Image: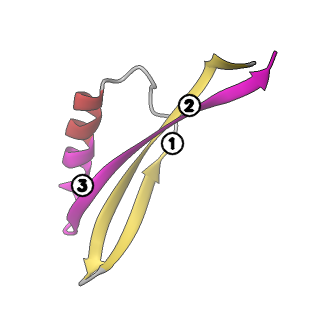
């Protein structure tokens, strides 16, 4: 049986922005507090994207932690 160790959980925020027609680029920020709610995560992603002149396509949240066999 597998068990997750959420004590070392990490989180990152990725902004997917349109660079040109049908061309996208990602900007990733690591070391985001994993206890941030999804609403706040989206809010800050939108605010960060507003600092650029690129069109925001989506905000991506990636949470990860270790899983080990018992």
Establish if 70 lies above or below 59. above
- Which of discs 2 and 1 lies nearer the camera? The answer is 2
Q: Verify CB contact (< 8 Å) between mark 2 and mark 1.
A: yes
Residue 56: where, in percent of width, then height?
A: 22, 61
Using residue 27 as the reference point, say whether residue 46 is left or right of it.
left
Label 3 Cα neighbours within 10 Å, binned few <14 / some 14-19 / many ≥20: some
User: Where is mark 2, residue-wise?
Assistant: 10
Camera-side mark, 2 or 3: 2
| First to last magenta residue range | 45-70
Residue beneath disc 3? 49
Find numbered disc 3 in the image and state the secondary structure of the residue it sits on: helix
- Mark 3 or mark 1: whose residue is earlier in sequence: 1
- Helix, strand or loop at label 2? It is strand
Q: CA distance from mark 2 to mark 3?
A: 22 Å
Image point 35% across, 73% down: which residue?
24
Query: Which quarter of the picture shows residue 15?
Result: bottom left
């Amino acid at each position: 049986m597998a068990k997750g160790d959420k004590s070392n959980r990490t989180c990152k925020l990725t902004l997917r922005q349109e660079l040109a027609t049908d061309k996208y680029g990602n900007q990733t920020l690591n070391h985001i507090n994993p206890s941030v709610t999804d609403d706040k995560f989206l809010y800050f992603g939108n605010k960060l994207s507003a600092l650029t002149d690129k069109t925001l396509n989506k905000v991506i949240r990636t949470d990860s932690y270790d899983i080990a066999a018992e």
